[in-house]
Image: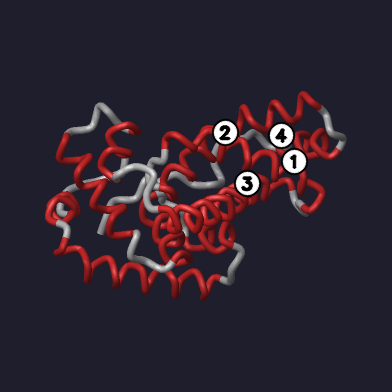
Amino acid sequence: MLERAGTSLSADTAPGSDERLLEGLLQRSPAATAELFDRHASYIQRVLTRLLGYVEPERADLLHEVFVRALEKVAELKSAGSLRPWLAGIAVFTAQEWLRRRKRRGPLLPPEEGAARAAPEASPEARQAVGECYQLLERFAEHERTAFILRQLEGMSLQEVADTCGVSLSTARRRIERAEADFQRLLPEYPALLERSRQPWRSP
């Protein structure tokens, strides 16, 4: 199985900072809005990149859309401690909308070209493996694709996947197990990805 990125949702902020930030957001403070973006934009951009497969031309617009939606819905956030997974959940919803639109018109970029743009320093073999990974994931049901990516590529814990997707722990586990079984079943059809999966591997 692919090596996980190992990034936890719980890292990165000092105690009390999310409470202060949420208070400012509820008061519609421009400084709090700027801080929200500065602190979380790189993480949300990475989540979008993983979910969408390196759609560079539209990634900035989608990132902006996530934060616009977050500011519109911030009053619904019940706990400052859940701010980051809540943002990731909005990113998941936004990405799934985009994927549904994309399926009606076809991929915006060939997966290997998108990987090359996202990680030009990566080797050709790594870019080919990433391209094949997303070709394989195109064959998954939407919710299983999302759960698999969050678990195996983004490195979330099972509980974090459940929280981000807004489902029960058992539902998240079931989706991941189905996706992992399908991944292993389909993997031999993708030679570069098969070879790469035998090595320590992370998507760019």
Residue for point 87% across, 35% down: 27
- Left or right, residue 3 beside residue 170: left
**What amino acid is found at the position of numbered circle 3 in the picture?**
Leu
Q: How many marks?
A: 4
Which of pointers 4 and 3 indicates the residue nearer the eye? 3
Instruction: Establish if 101 lies above or below 19.
Output: below
Residue tagged 2: 41
Q: Looking at the picture, does residue 91 appear above or below residue 175?
A: above
Disc 1 target residue: 71
Q: Position of residue 161 (x, y in %)?
A: 51, 60
**Amino acid type of the residue tagged 2 in the rendering:** Ala
Query: 55 or 159: nearer the eye?
Result: 55
Kind of element beneath mark 3:
helix
Q: Earlier in the sequence, mark 4 or mark 2?
A: 4
- Say which residue appears at 68% left-offset and 37% top-offset: 15
N-term mark: 1 or 2: 2
State which tag comes first along the sequence, 3 or 1: 1
Q: Reply above or below: 166 against 118.
A: below
Tell me, for residue 17, which label it has, or none.
Answer: 4
Q: Which residue is mark 3?
A: 87
